[in-house]
Amino acid sequence: MTATDQAIHLAKQAAEAANDKKGLDIVAFDVSEALAITDIFLIVSANNERLVGAIVDAIEERLIADEGRRPTRREGGNENRWVLLDYLDVVVHVQHSEERSLYALERLWKDCPRIELGLNGLAG
């Protein structure tokens, strides 16, 4: 099984919104083979809490406006160190750079295929 076209489209929309707000090291993994609960993990980082919040807001606004989708769950918004947006088929992790280094989600999912996001030659 691989990620659906709809999930890939949603991940790309979220990645573009994050990129527009200066999100860093944006990557997406097709985790559909490894997990039954979602198709894609999108990982974004930022250098401070304020920017984490701005990126999360931009992703939510874009997906509501363009796709009519709201996250079914949002966690971690109080401190803005690691915010998770769960769209069922796509889970977005927006992390402070320090959390991203510490938890290293890329290492955990390194065996899963990366999804090309087409962000003007930037990571992803």
Image (tube, helix red, strand yellow):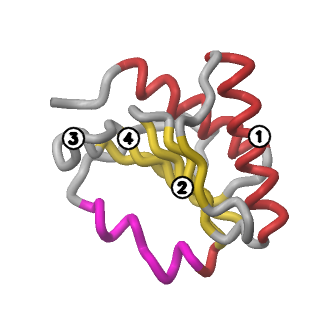
For label 1, the crowd category at 10 Å Cα-Cα, with few meaning under 14, some 14 to 19 and many 20 or more, is some
Q: State the residue position of label 1.
A: 58
Task: Work out whether mark 4 precedes mark 1 in sequence or the reverse, and give the earlier one.
Answer: 4
Label 2: element kind: strand
Q: Residue at x 62, y 29 (%)?
A: 70
Query: How far apart, in angstroms, are the residues tagged by discs 2 and 4?
Result: 11 Å
Quadrant for the N terminus, please: top left
- Does the magenta run of residues contain 28? no
For label 3, the crowd category at 10 Å Cα-Cα, with few meaning under 14, some 14 to 19 and many 20 or more, is few
Q: State the residue position of label 2.
A: 93
Say which amino acid is labelled 4: Ile
Q: Residue at x 42, y 28 (%)?
A: 8
Task: Work out whether mark 2 precedes mark 3 in sequence or the reverse, and give the earlier one.
Answer: 3
> Magenta segment, which residues?
99-110
Say which amino acid is labelled 3: Ala
Is the C-beta separation of discs 1 and 3 under 8 Å? Answer: no
Q: Nearer the viewer, mark 3 or mark 4?
A: 3
The answer to whether residue 68 is seen in the rendering is yes
- Out of 51 and 81, give the one closest to the viewer: 81
Query: How far apart, in angstroms, are the residues tagged by discs 3 and 4?
Result: 11 Å
Q: State the residue position of label 3.
A: 36
In the figure, residue 20 lies in which quadrant?
A: top right
Task: Work out whether mark 2 precedes mark 4 in sequence or the reverse, and give the earlier one.
Answer: 4
Task: Work out whether mark 2 precedes mark 1 in sequence or the reverse, and give the earlier one.
Answer: 1
Label 1: element kind: helix
Query: How far apart, in angstroms, are the residues tagged by discs 2 and 3?
Result: 18 Å
Q: State the residue position of label 4.
A: 40
Is the C-beta separation of discs 2 and 3 under 8 Å? Answer: no
Q: Nearer the viewer, mark 1 or mark 3?
A: 3
Is the C-beta separation of discs 3 and 4 under 8 Å? Answer: no
Q: Is residue 29 above or below residue 120?
A: below
